[in-house]
Image: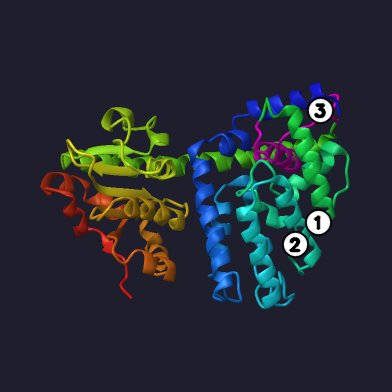
Amino acid sequence: MEKTALLELVDRYKSDPESVYNTWFVRGEQRLKAFRAIRRGVRDTVDAIAAQSFGSDFKGSPLEFVLSAITEQKQVFEGAAHAFFWKPKLRIPDIYENQLNKQKFGAFLSSCLDAKREEQVLVELSRLAAAEIKGLGPAVANIIYFLHPTLVPPFNTAILNGFNFLFGEKKKLGSWGSYRDMRETIIQTNVEVRDHLSKDVGAFAGLLFEIGSGRLLVTGSVQSLLEPAKIKAEKAARARHESVVAEENEESEHTKIQHVLIKIGRALNYRVHVARNDRHRSYNGEAFSILTVPALPQLDWPPEVMETVSLIDVIWLRPGTAEIVAAFEVEKSTSIYSGILRLEDLARSIPGCNCNLFLVAPDYREREVMAQLARPAFRDDLTDIRLAFIPFGDLCQHCDALCKFGEDSSILHKIARARPRL
């Protein structure tokens, strides 16, 4: 394939505002937030397998939380969890009932977590393939991508179809050999275009996904499509547009709740910090950049902790000091698990922390929040941390009253639900 033709395809991919490049890949911190949560979840999975507490089903296992965080990455990873669902009639994937296979899978994940070089990752992929664990195929790449995004491209039917079409191949979906060949081709081809795209191969995988989904037509000197393919592309484009609109509506509600928390915090005479990737937002004509402080005060924390804390949705600060009074993670539909991790990072970084931490989520997610807070890992870790749940409905309904009658952050406990004590 001519390089100029490929670059033209890349340009069309990037210029489409509804391509996954623009709706997922370049969404900055919103996408990058997932990487740490998934890495932590993979570590929890490894630890659970080592402690023989992993269980005999996907549901309720640490692996479920990993795949939940991955599938929240929208279009490219929709359905990524399906390959790991326990199918009792087929006894696959055989990493739940078979203890030896479970240990091999745990060792694979552990080695990939610790790997520093490409050859180390490739060796582990080959070892897992050689183990021939029934039902466990290249879909594992969707996990390893979040550990090594420049080395391991994600993998699903649409990406494979896009690859086969673009390169004139006939690679098979469940074949490790096909995946290894496909990975090599992607890495080599991405070298030619990464100055126009990214070193992170997720961007190129997104290009293949768009081709395989029928949204991105490969025309001209690259390939030509028949009329039915054009019809399919138009249908896919309409479906994508509806998805983008729905996502924008979801973000609007997230912004509304942040605005309510900013309003209450200011009414209680606190300085307010909003997640640094959200400072450009506004609600009802009020710009967050005007209502909030430009950055967190300088604190004696490691850079990676400052990075995580700066992405917490809303933080209240005591005037004239660097003291954090309260912090809020707003989880409309995203991972409760990752929200708890960010709040836990904050609490563990403050000696003698006595600030109030709140998960703010829709009313219907209360049971899910409480279930997460009751998990053994958090039950042990959060015993000395004040963490509670505030439902959207109560926060919005009582906003004016909280602003009018509240004297400090303790007013929030009138509407907050304390985490379960077991």
C-alpha gap between disc 3 and disc 2: 38 Å
Q: Amino acid at mark 3?
A: Thr
Q: Residues within 10 Å of mark 1 (few under 14, many from 20)?
A: many
C-alpha gap between disc 1 and disc 2: 9 Å
C-alpha gap between disc 1 and disc 3: 30 Å
> Which label number is shown at residue 176?
1
Residue lying farthest top? Answer: 4
Q: Amino acid at mark 2?
A: Leu
Q: Disc 1 vs disc 2: Cβ atoms closer than 8 Å?
A: yes
Front-lying residue, 283 or 29: 29
Which residue matches tag 2?
128
Residue 269 vertical placement versus 9 (above, below): below
Q: Which element carries disc 2, helix, strand or loop?
A: helix
Q: Which of the 4 quarters of the picture holds residue 88?
A: bottom right
Q: Amino acid at mark 1?
A: Trp
Residue pictured at 63% horizontal, 50% vertical: 77
Residue 225, percent across and down? 84, 33
First to last magenta residue range: 198-223
Q: Residues within 10 Å of mark 2 (few under 14, many from 20)?
A: many
